[in-house]
Image (cartoon, rainbow, N blue to C red):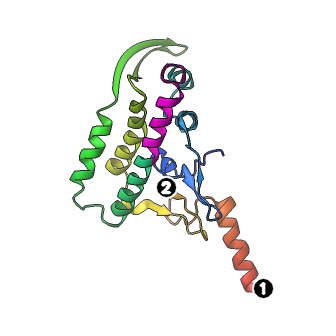
Amino acid sequence: MQSLFLGSHPAIDFLNSVFAPDGEPIETIGDGVAYVEWLVAAGLLEEADAAKLSRRFGPKALDAAAAEARKFREWARKWLADWRVAPRADYSDRIEILNRLLAREVRKRELVANRSGIALREVPRFETAQVLLALPAAQLALLVAHEDAALLRQCAGDSCTLWFLDRTKSHRRLFCSAAACGNRAKVAAFRERQR
């Protein structure tokens, strides 16, 4: 199953990597290969790095990283649900856990020549497959550090489990997707009016 990127932020898209459109959960990072593919699709990992990591660590290590990512995702979901309601609460215990995950990542800097000149880029170093968890953890850290908790929403669609960050100008977005849940709501309202 292809991942959905409707959350307007990589941390929210990570939460949405499991969803239940008809009440049955659909897991998009069920194994290590799917997890690496999700990281690439989310723009958190370069495709060339993903291929190297898959060869270097192998399926068993990547499957373990995916299992840890799924566990972290549910931990993050609970934290964000709490943060949305009480953004100023004391989250020092959760921040400490997140900081430990962030500490897994080591980056090196290198100069690269490209068409527009010379650029400095930061390149992550992956000593173990568990370092991959630092990528969505960094996005969660960026979300809670820089975004407004009041703009974090769950889709108003019937039985939709997706979340999103409302980046609309008026901050009145209700649905994960106007084409999917929004359209279903309009059709349901129309049918109700016809009765």
Residue 118 in the figure: left or right of residue 87:
right
Q: Where is residue 72 in the image (x, y as percent from the top left)?
A: 40, 47
Residue 75, can we see it? yes
**Residue drawn where x is 70% and y is 66% of the image:** 183
Q: Is residue 66 above or below residue 16?
A: above
Number of residues whose C-alpha sits closer than 10 Å to that of mark 1, classed few (under 14), some (14–19) or many (20 or more): few
Residue 178 in the figure: left or right of residue 15:
right
* Residue nearest the viewer, comparing 88 with 166: 88
- Mark 1 element type: helix
Q: What residue type is labelled 1?
A: Gln
Q: Name the residue under label 1.
A: 194
Q: Is residue 132 above or below residue 190?
A: above
Q: Where is residue 176 in the image (x, y as percent from the top left)?
A: 58, 59
Q: What residue type is labelled 2?
A: Arg
Report the span colored magenta. 54-70
**Residue 189 drawn in magenta:** no
Q: Mark 2 points at which residue?
A: 167
